[in-house]
Image (tube, coloured by chain):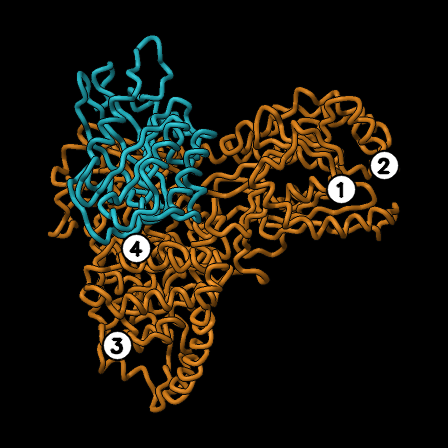
Chain colours: A cyan, B orange
Amino acid sequence: MATSGNKNINAKLVLLGDVGAGKSSLVLRFVKGQFVEFQESTIGAAFFSQTLAVNDATVKFEIWDTAGQERYHSLAPMYYRGAAAAIIVFDITNQTSFDRAKKWVQELQAQGNPNMVMALAGNKADLLDARKVTAEEAQAYAQENGLFFLETSAKTATNVNDIFYEIAKRLPRAQPVENPSGMVLMDRPAERAASASCCS
Amino acid sequence: MQETELHDLSDDADYAASQQHGSASITRSDSSKRSSSSEPEGAEIVYLKDNVTIHPTQFASERISGRLKLIKQGPSLFMTWIPYKGQNSNAKLSERDRNLYTIRAVPFTDVRSIRRHTPTLGWQYIIVVLSSGLAFPPLYFYNGGVREFLATVKQHVFLVRSAEDANVFLVNDFQDRLQRTLSSLELPRAVSVANGTPTSISVSESPNGNQERTDEGFYDGSSSTSQYNGRQKQKLHDPARDPLIHVLEKFSLVTKFARETTSQLFRESHGDGFSANGRRIHNQSSLDYPRKASDEPQKVPDEIPQKVPDEIPVPSDPCEKTSCRNQNHGEEAATNVGSFELIDCKEFGKLTVWGKPRLPPLGLEEWATFLDSEGRVMDSKALRKRIFYGGVEHRLRKEIWAFLLGYHSYDSTYAEREYRGSLKKSEYETVKHQWQSITPDQAKRFTKFRERKGLIEKDVVRTDRSLSFYDGDDNSNVNLLRDILLTYSFYNFDLGYCQGMSDLLSPILFVMKDESESFWCFVALMERLGPNFNRDQNGMHSQLFAISKLVELLDSPLHNYFKQNDSLNYFFCFRWVLIQFKREFEYEKTMRLWEVLWTHYLSEHLHLYVCVAILKRYRNKIMGEQMDFDTLLKFINELSGHIDLDAILKDAEALCICAGENGAASIPPGTPPSLPIENGSLYPQQDDDDVL
């Protein structure tokens, strides 16, 4: 688990986004292959892990799933600090959730790790009739801001594994010597040190 | 006041928000400034905060709470912190100790910097560092208010944020001549006190007692002491009355005191806790393993009890080893809780007696014996005790929860309750009508309403939908959840709706069935749990902090383990506390637990002991597997559905009694579900509801 070397990578990933955008549903689809129509709200945070094999390496995602309500915003830095990757989730049938996603992107750009791999997920892509945010609009925003964008559906599983694979591919392959402080965390002590500053 | 763009605090969201708070005092103090005089009656309190507390030692019982004030007199701003007198939890503190820490009128000209510490979870505190390099002990703001404090200071003295550390605010840090000149024009100060006393007290002495907690803060500014000494001190007519001298004298005492305390603590901890660490007690595994219910989780691999301790020595449980720290606890229990069946603390090790056996739930016939002919509860304490030990049968819940929650009073008659019910029903309809009468056009211009409604609608359709009561399309009970929550968000507009509330309402509606009764019972519950949902998370802070103190008291090896693993924020208990274990037990068990908690029989805060009881039950696993914070959170989340309620309640009861007064002293006053201690605005809000 806590192996070193560039074949096995531990990567902390955080899911952020508006209430009801589908953060928990995405992660449950990815980790357990399940979907529940009425996924209960997340209280506090949930933590999952899932390992992917990508090319020559395995990436173990350590996934923080967060509560969406603005009221709990003050807890967010605890999760995204030290994260190697983030998925910012919005609901394509809800314009407000897209606006909120942009705010999260701004916050991560300002406060997060500069090497963070960020993905924008336009979730609920199965609800085409109710679409309020076009793929073009989201794609353009993602490009301007250096994110990659995929429309996903936790319900039908469309693009769910793909978005995690894509992140895994984009994670910098830390070179043991050249990039000792890289954000792809190779061992647990380094990660603990990173989280120590924010959780005390 | 001049301020450079570089140091403009307006980029700080905290700070910007606090400007609104402070605006009232600006106006007041400006007027007093114009009419400034040196007479004492010109003094004006521009900031006042109660329950600001210092922690002289690690023992909660020795904390000292007091009142922090900022006082404006003429052009000068002073800070005072006066401990309360006669705190019953502080019986051990002598008057001398209290005096030792008192801060009497320190002028801000003597303050070098203020470091704020606002952890996401845990107490906010500040450390005030004097120009001399000495610092006061951390002042913990139990009721929040750090940013108002800083905002108020900033209105009266020159305050800039340190370029090195955004949490350090420098007082009177004039970076260039222009500012210095401007400032000296505005706030003329007599030059120099030139007393040599301050720096003669070695800086290195000051933090001894509090080193662990305060780390860096104490040393702030010590290197630049000399450059301030000459310039910033305020001249007072009588050197003997120089508050600074007083402060420093006090401080030399404080440090001496703190040093003594530290070494004493060190000795104590070696004497009573640490020496046995690592030494396995033969029956230790019997503590955690044999009591597991047969339906233990498959996901939680506890099935190999002997393996883990062989690999990693786990410090033994102090309760188990020493039975109970204080041999008198058994007697105290007997006096405090009357006829309570005495728990023999000596038996903890063998676990033969561990809390009183649980009783079957209160049934109809027995319930009748508690009522007089007109329906009054004759002995509410006896009733609460009975429910504490067994809960109530489901069919009685509707009637009894109304008492437990405080919707009906115990001494009301059947007729009075019926009458009150009808009054309350029309009151509910009035509030409900407020949002029902909002027209679509009006709603277009009422963002906050639309947001709240949207949020509530998103949550009610995913609250307990697996229960037949709430399942199916267009379920009328789901609609009731929505209506009640929306009405509540108008009844308590300041607090609004927050995720987690639907979890708290769901069982209440399930039990009460009636819309108005459910609403009022929910209101009563939120009177106590509302602070859980405050924006500043104060209610959660105080509870998680209290858990930390209780674990420290009841299982110091486990506490040390969390400390070493950066888990002292106890954030992994967040969900437990926020919604009272609603997600941890099946529905029926949740209702049972709630009615037990609501009796407030042994303590208003039994839920915190429940947290400790669960953690203790899994302590060997947590420490043996060396869980870090992430793993711990995952582990705790996955305990959901696998906790044996009756066993945990018995443990919690025993821990509560064992902790006794020390336990009670670990829980700050006003901690939910205690009723709020402050009047005025219960839910201080900024106007930023649900927008980033």
x and y percentages locating residue B94 in the rendered image: 61, 48
Identify the residue at image location x=32%, y=56%.
Answer: B459
Of B234 and A180, the residue lying toward us: A180
Q: In the image, which disc is placed on residue B236?
A: 2
The residue to which callout 3 is attached is B396
Q: Type of residue at label 2?
A: Leu
Residue B335 appears in the figure: no
Secondary structure of residue under mark 1: strand
Lower position in the chain sequence, tag 4 or tag 2? 2
Looking at the rendered structure, whether the residues under marks 3 and 4 are on a common chain is answered as yes
Q: Is residue B491 above or below residue B193?
A: below
Q: CA distance from mark 4 to mark 1?
A: 47 Å
Residue B636: quadrant of the picture: top left
The residue that label 4 is drawn on is: B581
Q: Chain of mark 1?
A: B
Front residue of this view, candidates B320 and B640: B640
